[in-house]
Image (spheres, coloured by chain):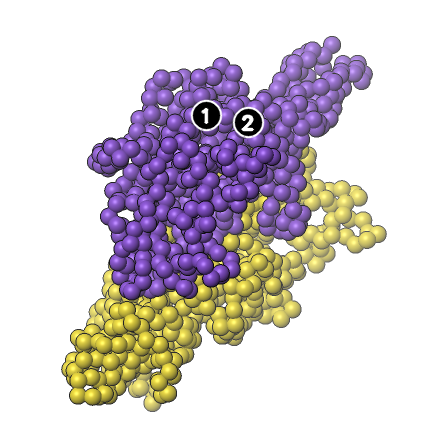
Chain colours: A yellow, B purple
Amino acid sequence: MNFSFRLIFCLVSCSFLGLVDGTQSVSAQQDGTPGLRAIGTPHAPKVQMSWNRYHDNAEILKFCKDLQDAYPDLVQFEVIGQSYKGNDILALTLTDFQSGNAEDKPAFFIQANIHPNELQGTEISMYTAWYLAENYGVVDFITQLLKDRTFYILPTINPDGRDYFIYQPNNPNSPRSGLMPFDDDGDWEIDEDGFDDLNGDGHITMMRRENPNGRWKEDPKNPLRMIRVGEGETGNYDMLGYEGIDRDGDGRVNEDRTGYYDPNRDWGWNWQPDYVQRGSLMYPFASPENRAVKDFVIARPNIAGAQSYHNYGGMFLRGPGAEEDRDIYDRNDTRVYDLIGKKGEKMVPGYRYLVVYKDLYSVFGGDVDFFHGGRGIYSFVNELMTAYLLFHDENQINRWEDTQFYDFDKYLLFGDAYVAWEPYDHPQFGPIEIGGPKKNYVRNHPGFLLEQDAHRNMAFTLYHAYQMPRIVIREPQVRPINSGLNEISVTVDNVRATPTHSSHDLKNRITPPNVISISNVEVISGMIMSNPDLGVGEEQVHEPADLRVNNIPGNGSVHLRWIVEGNPGNFEIEVVSKKGGRHRLEVR
Amino acid sequence: MKFFLITCALVFSSNLLMGQFEYPTLGEIEEELKSLQALHPDLVSVESIAETPGGQDVWLIRMGRGDEDLTPGLMFVGSVDGRHPAGSVMNIKLMERILENRNSLLDNFYFYFVPVLSPDAYAQYHAELIYERLGNARETDIDRDGRISEDPYDDLDGDGLITMVRIEDPTGRFTTHLSDDRIMIEFEERSDREMIYRLISEGIDNDKDGLFNEDGPGGVNLNKNFSFDYPAFQPGAGEHAVSEEENRKLAEFLFERWNIYAVFTFGLENNLSHPVEFDRSKVDQRVIKGPLEKDASVNQKVSRLFKDNALLQDAEKMEQGSGSFSSWAYFHYCRFSFVSPAWLAPVVESDRDTEGKSDSLSGNYDLRYIHWAESQGISDYFVDWTEIDHPDFPGRKAEVGGFKPFVRYNPPLKYLEQEADDYFTFIQSVCEKMPRLEFQDISVEKAGDGVFRIKGRVMNSGQLPTGTELGDRSRWVRDIRHRILLSGEQELLLGHYRDFHKSLQAGEYFEFSWLVSGSGRVTLDAASPMTGLTTRVIELK
């Protein structure tokens, strides 16, 4: 009783304060939507979405347009470039446009689906945009976040691959590339021997053939599952690989299919050629999709945090991708990553915070390295979905081949996830059987798990976005020096964990320095004080009104001092920080 | 664009009056290329592969006939480095010589030229203010301070040339050369008698950051922008490797041309006078930093051919820099890559001792250049040191002067004729040594009734390998393909109708054996884009 009174009071007072657009529906209580709002979820969203399915390019486009139409003051949608096949690459910009320009606020960047078979990052990105827009004016935290920050959200950066995965026969692991055609097997021909959907069910599953002396047999507990027989045992099947035939007569099946390269070995930081890093293309950013994304990012130096969504394994990954890049993550930068990564482990049970080269393997040319190494942006890759989500078994974190997926299919999906073994007459192998996991199982979440993981992973990114720099200019102190001169001292705080410049950024001068200016006064001298109490600092002789401050540390402050002619009347302090935003304080 | 060309031409002619800067303008180069195409429409095609930030075309010239995909190609590139327009002229002179010689070379090879990869930088040679420009016309913040092009060169003496400024300063690092006090040298140890200078490029510290001319217009240095050993965030390197359209489109072109065997670059680097040594420690790692052993020995071999043709004698070492095109062409394009200046000032006879050595020059190229210029009656190569008032050094003696831009590595055009003749002979001798696939010892055994076993070898009968050793690791270099093509009712009893092999060194071979049922004609072929196609027809009976 007491609680609901307070809730209503808050909503009413919020709209008085102008936080809530009068036309927006904020609660069931106000607009008459039946039922009771579930905590954490928009109750009567303007854009109706189901977060338990996977969307194709046309649906993503429609979503972007609908969200912009519903929230024109919060959402802008644009096309940032074209894919190899000419599909549009879409970007959403979310911020409270009334409270400032998008480019004048610290920005958080989200991209997903670089690997086509890793669908769900797209849904999580869209969920994030939807949740932010639908909760503006409803959840105070979100309202403030959209006033302070900008979000750039690219739901899929591989639209060619996405629709190809969705509409063409594929298996859970194919493809991992865009659709630029290449000669995978080095026989001078291009894509001449791809998968064949022999049984025409839209999934590329497995082929098996009976053999009285085989090395495989059916799992007695679940006949869908094939297991290798032990030493000294005899099985009754051979496994013949994924559905296909030898189309080019070279004695191999499915060896030159659509796509082979890995667009996540294509990013321009410590890029290495294919003979060092398998899967890379001819040169960095050879994929037109990545090139468009890269141009978008470079043109927005306000991006201070970045997130890429991948699957699989339940991980928050940070760089370095390659051991050779160990030195570009120093202690200060690592502290920021640790804060966010460890918080993530709490927010998304079953996910672990790991370092790519140390905990997985060395990779060159990944997106996470481009963001940190190439742009000085704190960035994570989330590897979505883990077997832990099936039965919450701690032993199942990051497990691939296990009975659990079969058990989950049996008890919770009722056989929906596998194609049962069926006979087929193969032109080269003779009588075989075809069956196995559907392409949308294992790596991609089953529908009812998707919404929860979307929310949790979004919350992780919002925590990261929250920890981007937040600059506060304190009230300046004015002290007369003599009849003609005054000294103005001001402290500028960064009240969040992320500095305006990562250590790697500072070292390489990736982002220009912050400029803290005083205007409307005649400046004699300007100083950046390392210890204002004891008068320790450094003078900037050239253009002293515009002090160039290399960094405003996370949860830290910088102190500026000017000596000015005469008695300052009205003056203004302005902070222009690429990653910390533009801030102004008028003093009267 | 047209307007720009006209402006260039005007400046060009005014400099002609001064008897200097006679190299062709971009417009004249374009005209020359198009006239070659018009004269030899069956052999020459000209296309623009990229547009620069300055709105210029990057021209690619393709020369050859026949099946391009199975004819070995050689690539020539100039003006990756804007300081060396002689490399562009050399490209054109080479084209002319190849076309004169059309019948022998053009039957067997394709030749590709990008004479000016960085036209934006090249254009500075003919601009109102002449200086050795490294960058293209992209707007960049070279010193990464948030301000664009805020500290360019300044023509302090108003002569239209950017040279140097020397300031008398006891904290400096430079002094004058004992043999010629116009030449500035960096000293190792102080001594009392020396006049000590600070040496900077011509200009003032416009943005008062303590650095001189560190952020002028232009841009990205294309020769620091390739992906091997890319110098991230160094001045002129760009925002990431291969960020510039000139470089990206050149790379794209090269990767589409599987037949290109070797890349010859003209620039201020040199692995032909001084081949790169093999160093095991540089290749025993994941990211290799030096050439593989067999490739290093090819570098030695080609270097000998270069020197045998009297090219660039007495050349000092000039290392290949980080992010350079020529390093990339080997390490990431995985083809043989050779680079050299188009010209160096020859050592004059009076600088040689009785053994022909030139120790008296003590490795000072400036001195060597001056002696050569004087011997040729060239006198307008230097801006004599002249005192000026330099606002950043009040109370100190400052003088503007030094070599005129470009002169030391870009001689008057007539001196490039001999150089081009020699370089052309060098290329001819490389072509003579190119790899060739040859069938050897083909035998047909009757294995049974109507079953034949065909055996034999495919050998590289040339004197160079069919590709780099590094190329064997790369998916962007094609393996040698070896096929058997059957006729009629013939059937292959074992194996597949084609096989692939890694590169063959000179004299190296692989063996093959096919089992065929059915008589009649079979065709064997062996090919790689970089060596061409060899075919043999056999009658099985």
Residue at numbered disc 1: B418
Q: Is residue A546 left or right of residue B462?
A: left
Q: Position of residue B186 (x, y in %)?
A: 46, 54
- The three-letter code of the residue at mark 1 reads Gln
Q: Is residue B210 left or right of residue A172?
A: left
In the image, residue B70 sits, relative to residue A523, either above or below, namely above
* Residue at left offset 38%, top offset 71%: A551
Tell which circle, 1 or 2, labels the residue nearer the N-terminal end: 2
Q: In whole angstroms, how far apart are the C-alphas of marks 1 and 2? A: 11 Å
* Residue at left offset 60%, top offset 35%: B355
* Residue at left offset 73%, top offset 42%: A210
Respond whether the residues carrying marks 1 and 2 are from the same subunit: yes
Element type at mark 1? helix
Mark 2 residue crowding within 10 angstroms, few (<14) / some (14–19) / many (20+)? some
What is the residue that sits farthest to the bottom in this orientation? A2
Cβ atoms under marks 1 and 2 closer than 8 Å: no
Q: Nearer the viewer, residue A147 or B314?
A: B314
The residue marked by circle 2 belongs to what chain?
Answer: B
